[in-house]
Structure formats: C-alpha cells, structure tokens
Image (cartoon, rainbow, N blue to C red):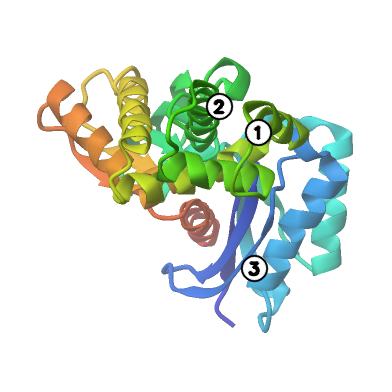
Amino acid sequence: MEPLVLGLDVGGTASRAVVTDLDGAVLGSGAAGGGNPITVGPEAAAAQVAAAARSALENLDPARVRSAVMGIAGAGDFGRSETGAAFRSRWDEIGLGCEVAPVGDVVVAFAAGTDRPRGTVLIAGTGAVAAQIEGDRMTRVGDGLGWLLGDRGSGFWIGRSAAVASAEALQAGSVPGELVNAVVQAATGGEEATPDEFAQAVYRNPIRSLAELAPLVDRAARSGDPLAAGILDRAAEHLAETATSVPPSDRDGPIVLSGSVLRECLPVREGVRTRIAALLPGADIRVGGPGELGAARLAARSAASSRD
C-alpha cells in the first residue's frame, strides 16, 4: 500500500497532527492540548502529542507511516533520556514503525509556506520568533526569548497588554469599552470588578492563560474599540521589527508569516505586511499554512529520498 507520513506541530497550548500521502493529500488530522515537555513535563507532553497523532491516524494503519516529523520549540530537549523515553513509549503504543524526528517549530513553519530552501520565517502564536532558514536549518534568530524576556507581538504579549490596559482603565475609573468589559468578564467571570478584584483574578490564573485573551482583542478591534486597535498596531510594529532583523543577506528568499496570530488576526497580519514592504521593498511575503502541514512536507521529502 502507498506509504504515509505524519506531521506534528507542537506548541505550548495545542498539539496538532496530520497524516498525508507523499504528494501532500491530507488523509487524517487531529488535535490535543499543549505538548511541550519543557513547560508541561515529558509524560504529560507525550500524552497530548500522542492523542493528536492517534486521532489523525484513526481508520489508518500506523504501520504505513514511513516518516514522521514533529515541529516543536526546544527540540534539543529530546536529547534528554527522560523526554525521549516518554515519547518513544507513546509511539510504540500507537504502533508507529518509524522514528519521529523532532525539529524546530520554526523550520516546519517555514516549510509550510514555501518549497524554497532559503528565506525568513516570522511566527506569532503564543510566542513570537523570526529566523533565517538555510537548507532546513536556522542560521539566525530574532526574539523567541519567551514571555518573560521577549515574544513581543505574540498572542501572550497581546493578551498581557489587554490585561494591563484593562487594569489601568479600572484604576482610572474610565468608562469601560468593549475590550475592557470582555477582559474583565474573561478574567473574573463577572461583568464588573474593582481593580483589586481584577488583579487578584489575573494572578490566580496560570500566567500563560493571558494568551487566551488575544482573540478578545482582535474581536474588539474589529468592532472599532480604539484601545484594542492600538494594542494590535503595536503588536504588528514589534513583529515587523523582529522579521526584518533576520532576513537572508542577499534577501532573495521569501518571508513566510506563520502562527495563529498572523494567520487569524487580520489587523496584525496586514500591519506586518505593510511595515515589512516599506522596510524591504519588493519582499516576497507569504502566509504559511498550519505547521503540521510543513512537518508533513518535510517528512514526505525524507520518505521520498529514502526510496531513491
């Protein structure tokens, strides 16, 4: 039977999987929770990633999978015996007969937007990073420093900015607009809150949950809320600066925009496009597909080369 490949895109808040044939036709897909072993631990991470893979392989024979690639931030963690063992155990349970190669999520994001071997990728999801890609390797990196030190313009940055702006509005006694109302509701579960009540609710929640506020900012901005629009405009500015800090030296490769923020938030995506075009006239700017499709494309290349 025709061989299949498995592509996985693993992030801090979600894990996604896709099964394709060697020509890229999608035969199955699945999703589960965050699966980065650095943030949730090896066992919990492996369980979530395996759940996404198992769902993608439903009604398909895992033995047909000839190659598998997993895009994940911090792929080097798989050099640790604890992490490697946790994931290998899950792959054995599923019945995969091939190795699942962990590669940087940046590399699979670039592959999801182009067949070219050289260029730049900008990712804005929960975090934010830009990288120069040379033959499926990262040669320069911008940002990607995590929520504490960087990730400017990311979903976390947008959500945290919304929480900060809401807290300031409550303290100032301003008439709350759509964004502040939505953020207060999301954080506290109620329609109103004092500044202290709001702050306490935010601090009680996991810090990474601030990224979940980003869609509220997008929704409010589309409804005309100036506070939300300003946050998204600043996010676009940060992301464009990050992207243009790492283009290939000869600038002949495409710039691929990837990640949930850039794919789903039109104001940020168009703001980034406009700024990059102004800074790098003639740049080939593309919007990449989901990372799991990029991982499957890399897996298909590997499977095809092994057959030659």
Which residue, given by chain and number where applicable, does mark 3 sit on?
65
Q: Residue 240: percent from the left, percent from the top?
A: 30, 26
Is 82 above or below relative to 5?
A: above
Q: Label 2: state its secondary structure.
A: helix
Query: Which residue in the structure is indicated by mark 2?
Result: 167
Q: Classify residue 254 as left or right of residue 305.
A: left
Distance CA(mark 1)–CA(mark 3): 49 Å
- Could you tell me which residue is drawn at 72 percent across and 55 percent down? 49
Q: Amino acid at mark 3?
A: Val
Within the image, what quadrant is residue 38 found in?
Answer: top right
CB-based contact (under 8 Å), mark 2 and mark 1: yes
Question: How far apart are labels 2 and 1 at the CA level?
Answer: 7 Å
Name the residue that disc number 1 marks.
Answer: 198
Residue type of the residue flagged with mark 2: Ala
Give left or right: position of 257 versus 151: left
Along the line of sight, the residue nearer the viewer: 214 or 186:
186
Residue occupying image coordinates x 71% and y 53%: 99
Quarter of the image with the N terminus is: bottom right
Q: In this view, which residue lies farthest toward the left?
A: 282
Q: Check disc 1 and report its element: helix, strand or loop.
A: helix
- At label 2, counting other C-alpha atoms closer than 10 Å, the crowd grade (few under 14, some 14-19, many 20 or more) is many
Residue at 63% across / 38% down in the picture?
193
Q: Is residue 114 visible?
A: no
Residue nearer the viewer, 231 or 251: 231
